[in-house]
Image: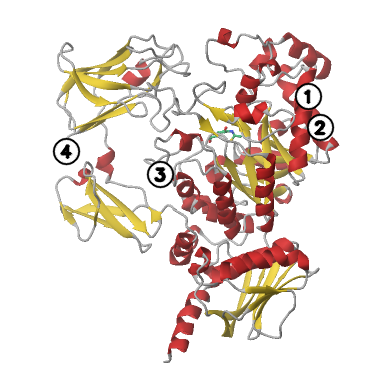
Amino acid sequence: MNIRILLSVIATSASLCVSAVVPQPHSYEKRSGEFSISETTTICVDDAALLPAAEYLAEYTGLGVSEHSPESDFIRLATVLQLETEGYSLTVADSGITILGGGYGGVFNGIQTLLQLLPDGVYSHACPLPAYIGLCRIDDAPQFGYRGLMLDIVRTWMDIDKVKRYIDLAAYHKINKLHIHLSDDEGWRIEIKSHPELAEVGGWRGRGTPVWPVYGKWDERYGGFYTQEEMRSIIDYAAVRNIEIIPEIDLPGHSRTIARIHPEILCGYTPDMEITGGYDYRRVWCVAREENYELLEDILGEICGIFPSKYIHIGGDEVETTQWEQCPHCKAYADEHCGGDTARLQEVFMARISDILVRHGKLPAVWNEASARGSLLPESRVYGWESIDKCRAAASKGYKTVVMAGKYFYLDMRQSQHEDGHTWAGVFDVGQCCSFDFAAEGFTEAQLANVAGVEAVFWSELYASHNPEKTDYTDYQLFPRLCAVAEIGWGKRSDAPTFLKRLCTDHYSRMADMGIRFRLSPPRLKYTDGKLTASTDDGSTIYCKRENDTLWSPFTQPIATTKPAEYLFRSEYRSGVSPAVGVAGHYTRLKPALKMSSTIPASKEKPYANAERYRGVAQTARTCREGDSITFEFEQPVRCREAEFLTGYEHLPRFIFEAGYVETSLDGVQFERAAELHGGRARLVSPRPFRFARIVCTRSGSGTPYIIVSPPIIKPLL
Ligand code: TNX
């Protein structure tokens, strides 16, 4: 066989398997033969409006662009009226490749399919030419017009380049909306020219700024914001990639940052914020204060001017209404506008904000709480996050609803029990994510007709808490789960095992070339007849180590051991990494009887008995001062292979001793310093037996209103 034929066989056998295109095309017809893309192949467009798409394709392939169609050796881009806006047909024929789209988005979607048919190197702008593509015809269109990704760039700041990178990665998966969360309790990240202080002050937190330091970033001046010009560059960048940016200003709750800068927006404003006890929980706009609407007119007027999207997200989640109940102005306002029911003031507030948007030619998008009573403007778009039921309820009320229920779509949730992330909506990996099914979740035909689409959500408070910050945490949380969300939105579904197989066979290597540091499923472990083995079926390499070793070595053969719980395994495939896992016994914890005491009194809500019984966390009644301590007195001497003492929550280092150490003792008199606190916690490896362990604080709290104490984590001797 000559080399050209050999190459073509390799290339076509890799490319013909269209089931590996993610998200999966709706219809694919294979034909015999192949077309080769070489340096001479020309990208041509019939319509100048398609030039940005052509140049995009040129950037990846290195091919030239022309406005005239040659007879052969072309990649032709054109729009046709017969197709849906985002639908496309991609034909690979002897003479060339034709991508017809219903609109710009359709052509762009066709380009994404074409990129996935090419060698993976195309994603690193290094497509080996000639590249052979099997002749075929693909007819494809998304089920849903809304296929979104939400980034919370407030809790963890992302600069323009990082946002653009996620726009690229989302575009590869035919995601067409980026919902960008721009304001929250922890920051304000968009320039407002009429009120420059919002971004200039609210974009930064930490010592010396009015915005409280949070999530373990105590000392650092932390943050950033986008100027309007920078935001316009992001919008344009996204538009080329068929992504519309939907901005969110979260109102009337989640507003602590703006309230720190403009405390007069709150109910019962007192110029002396210290009166609130040093930590300001009041974060909800006063509904009765007329000047608030003037300020919001200024802010939202500018937001409407920057963003071309029809919808502007105005929040509406987790609104704490107790301040309205205590505010005489809000009470009077409620008497006048909603029968004295202060809980309904949110509706009144949202209606007024909607008016502002409508005056600026826009429509409101809100979190599902704001739609609960069905009094929103009927054209509002609802983002259903709390549960599937809330999504269905919003759709039943007639609102166009974006489904993003936490247990499938919140990619800030943990992917398995012992990994990082929230758990409130569940612990799930890509398998669970792709098992989402509208019918199985009880959506009726009528409700489904109001589903605008789906959105993957990445809240970033846990990311910001990592110290040092984990630069690849966002990639790891998003991928491959975002691939599953993209496929749900596209609508041509395969069952979970088939989807996972498609990921392993083609998409893992593609994601590696896309530069994504994605998560692999952990190795499966088996311990029989004194031998410990690990296996994977995704082509990854398995590594192992004893838990206290620093270095990992390749796992090559079963390990003969009587202590399997000592070992940890993980796998790698190019830039993909799995979490480390051990056998069940590795996670066994001792819960020896103990008494907890402290120089700080306990809170009523979370008494120290919680930690004593290993049932949840305990909470102090005040913040910590230098010299404060927390003592655990065990009934019997504790012998263990590891003990970890932690302030704050296990996976969330907030409400912690910012600096300190742990000391242990057998008699309660002679204490020995055993380990320093890092991020509020200290790990004692192979400690001497102890009956007392004391966490000592060496720096007073710089903003936390109280301290959380978790039960100690004690691993048995093996
Ligand atoms: C709830 S989802 C929130 C966010 C948190 C998230 C953590 C929503 C509208 N509000 O403020 O970051 O949970 O998962």
Residue most toward the right? 359
The residue that label 4 is drawn on is: 718
How far, Cα to Cα, is label 1 from label 3?
45 Å
Give the residue type at disc 4.
Leu
Above or below — where is 699 with respect to 566?
Answer: above
Q: Secondary structure at mark 1?
A: helix
Q: Indicate yes or no: mark 2 CB to ligand 1 under 8 Å.
A: no
Badges 1 and 2: C-beta atoms under 8 Å apart? yes
How far, Cα to Cα, is label 3 from label 4?
24 Å
Residue 697, which numbered label? none
Residue 600 showing in the rendered view: yes
Of the two numbered discs 4 and 2 on the same chain, state the one appearing first in sequence.
2
Above or below — where is 528 with respect to 324?
Answer: below
Above or below — where is 450 with respect to 709?
Answer: below
Q: Quadrant of the N terminus?
A: bottom left
The residue that label 1 is drawn on is: 293
Give the residue type at disc 3.
Ser
Of residue 712 and residue 223, the one placed in the foreground of this image is 223
How far, Cα to Cα, is label 3 from label 2?
44 Å
Percent x, y for residue 118?
54, 72
Residue 416, which numbered label? 3
> How crowded is the residue under tag 3: few (<14 C-alpha within 10 Å), some, or many (20+)?
some
Percent x, y for residue 114?
60, 70
The residue that label 2 is drawn on is: 356
| Residue at the image point whose x is 47% and y is 62% from the top | 513
How far, Cα to Cα, is label 4 from label 1?
64 Å
Q: Secondary structure at mark 4?
A: loop
